[in-house]
Image: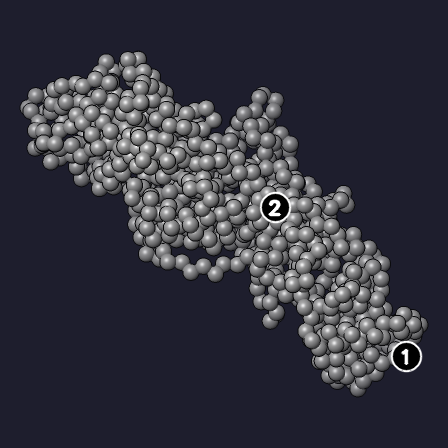
Amino acid sequence: MTPRPESSGPHPEQPAERRPAAAEPAKKAAKKAAAASKKATAEKAAAKKTAAPKTTAGKAAAKKGTAGGPAGRTPAPEEAVRDAAAPRGREIAVSPAVDSADRERLLNGTHHAPHSVLGAHPVPGGVVLRAFRPYALAVTVVSGGLTVELHDDGDGFFSGLLPLGGVPAYRLLVTYEGTVQETEDAYRFLPTLGEFDLHLIGEGRHEELWTVLGAHPMTHQGVTGTRFSVWAPNARGVRVAGTFNFWDGTGFPMRSLGSTGVWELFVPGIGEGELYKFEITRPDGSKTLRADPMARRTEVPPATSSVVTSSAYEWGDAEWLERRAEAPAHRAPFSVYEVHLPSWRPGLTYRQLAEQLPAYVKDLGFTHVELMPVAEHPFGGSWGYQVTGFYAPTARLGTPDDFRCLVDALHRAGIGVLMDWVPAHFPRDAWALAEFDGRPLYEHGDPLRAAHPDWGTLEFDFGRREVRNFLVANAVYWCEEFHIDGLRVDAVASMLYLDYSREPGQWTPNERGGRENLDAVAFLQEMNATVYRRVPGVVTIAEESTAWDGVTRATHHRGPSGFGGLGFGLKWNMGWMHDSLQYMSHDPVHRRHHHGEMTFSMVYAYSENYVLPISHDEVVHGKRSLVSKMPGDWWQQRASLRAYLGFMWAHPGKQLLFMGQEFAQGAEWSEAHGPDWWLLDPHYGAEADHRGVRDLVRDLNTVYRDTPALWRCDTEPSGFRWVTGDAAEDNVFAFLRYDGDGSPLLAVAHLAPVVRQDYRIGVPDDVPAWREVVNTDAGRYGGSDVTRPDPVKPEPQGRHGFPASIRLTLPPLATVWLRPA
């Protein structure tokens, strides 16, 4: 047996209980065949001597019918087997053995059409049956309860000529040292892929690509087994290796299906749970063992094999799916809790997370979770941003159906599920996508275009239709197969620009002479258009950090740059994140000099549909946690954090907050241990400080969801009006948010550590009274409790361009929300 590569499945020396057992009749037949093995060499030699080349008599016999039988009559299988077993004194038309050219290609793994050689084939004079079973001692045809041993042609090849007029139903009895297997012949089956599927693959338009490529347990021609198929257009040959053949794919060559570059093989008798890889013969004749790019399940890293799988999960989220498309994301409440699944509660599986995560998120009032990492990746420290299994949920936490259970549980709790999706690049691991079939395939052929300068990875070739198809279908796959409600698309900026992180001379302009990656633009437009067409209610979100025009504009609407929109539903507002955190990091005494850092976002707030992201990227690698970014002592840090969150939730745009920041974790996040949950232990002395911040987040979400003024007109200028954006000396920001019917919410952020009495704020004169609905300085949050429980009435004294005003006592380092009483 071929030794098993270290990265592939279990040791090839399978335990006896894993080996297929032969049926009892087959064992008896094998014993009978083995008893006669001493006479086999002489009989085979005699048979070869009696075999004659094609003759006129042979042709005549073939025209009449089966050689040696009446014209027009096909013998019964019993007669055929009996005839084949008789001494071969008659002339036959062909030699049944595999010819030397086919034999060499099969042995070397370079045969494009093994089904044309192996299996049963009608020929003049009968039916030739050939088998390629390396390491077998004997191969016998089983038909109608009788058996016929095939001739051993050496090197694992066996052949025989059955004097039949048609191919009978048959099985193979394969004798190995110490065991016998009765099995179907993989080379008697027709292709499992239809012409229409192949046509769509060839055009790069198969939107359900995962249903035709990869490994699929199925019943084909009445036989159960698994269909393997893979796209490898540069390969000289492809074979399947796995636990079912002791990781030796020699006897399992796949056939090439036309000019599509797709290779296919139906292997009977194997099913879910088997490990496998594809053994590819490169153009230079060398071989490489590769995981399936379309694998829907993988081994737990660091093991790298693909796993045959099928889903038996029964969903319970029909009600959620029916109503999720009632309003687009930019006109609905959208508050996101970002979760690193392996470290949220370290050690929990998908199903254990399903028991805890939905309840926690629902209690805090978030509308969505964003999950990372989801797709399989070899290195946990990459947080899932260097993907090798684009169609497989990471096996670290369970099976694909286990992941479905988690999504289902979140939906049944009324929580939408977003996932990080990484179509920009992939790692160079030699068992994965890099030069998959011996040449650049998924990556660009130009080394300058292929190599990502920042991450040591390879960029996808977005100009190749099959690669675009692979990625577009992948986006649809997660949404349809796992009921994902949104895709947060990582590193969009790195895709859009040819000169991204490249110096002059390291990139080539596009056909227009510009730096835009036209292939990536076309891919993103196609992906978004396809997802929105196929899966109503789903949202796509771009992590895009530049001023690219029209990220969230419809693909058919052209902008000033001449490009159609990219078609995303939302875009991360990286500028707001950077500027606001920069402002908050300044000591309050210096903030007046940086006032514009908090107001500049409103200059472009309606250029796109924005999400305000405080993500994992902002609380790792020396950037400090959110509360630790704030200056001052512990009280001031927490107060500034609470004020910042109140400002953030009131600002136009959706919200995203990374786990641990909701309770003011002081340490940076680490994927090794996750959030510091012990800070919420009632026995911890400062527990109230952390619980207060979490209570605030809960109340912010609750009021936010109940106040359409904070989300219905998020993307419309009519939904916002400054009251005062220039009170730099006071460190005050005040603005109004409006519902579509004009119902307002007044937000006042005071980011100085003093109390300001009787601070006058301009307001409309058509609101009889205002009342506080959120005050981040409340005592229950850990503040100084400078609050106003009673409504405040406007006075007819104009202020800030409004005809009326109210007098407020502004708490220190706090944000206050007021609504009409």
Total number of numbered labels? 2
Nearest the eye: 161 or 62:
161
Residue 329 appears in the picture as rendered = yes
Q: Looking at the image, what colour scheme do you see?
A: one colour
The residue positioned 32% from the left and 49% from the top of the image is 414
Q: Which mark is residue 303?
A: 2
Q: Position of residue 555 (x, y in %)?
A: 42, 40
Nearest the eye: 9 or 457:
9
Q: Is residue 707 left or right of residue 799?
A: right
Using the numbered discs, state the Cα–Cα distance from disc 1 to disc 2 in whole angstroms. 56 Å
Reading the image, the residue beneath label 1 is 89
Q: Position of residue 671 (x, y in %)?
A: 47, 35
Nearest the eye: 7 or 456:
7
Indicate the quadrant containing the N terminus: top left, top right, bottom left or bottom right. Answer: bottom right
Q: Three-letter amino acid code at disc 2? A: Ala
Residue occupying the far left of the picture: 796
Indicate the quadrant containing the C terminus: top left, top right, bottom left or bottom right. Answer: top left
The residue positioned 28% from the left and 30% from the top of the image is 689
Residue 618 appears in the picture as rendered = no
Q: Three-letter amino acid code at disc 1? A: Gly
Mark 1 or mark 2, which has the lower sequence index?
1
Q: Is residue 239 above or below residue 357?
A: below
The residue positioned 71% from the left and 77% from the top of the image is 25
Occupied quadrant, residue 660: top left
Occupied quadrant, residue 637: top left
Secondary structure state at the residue bearing disc 2: loop
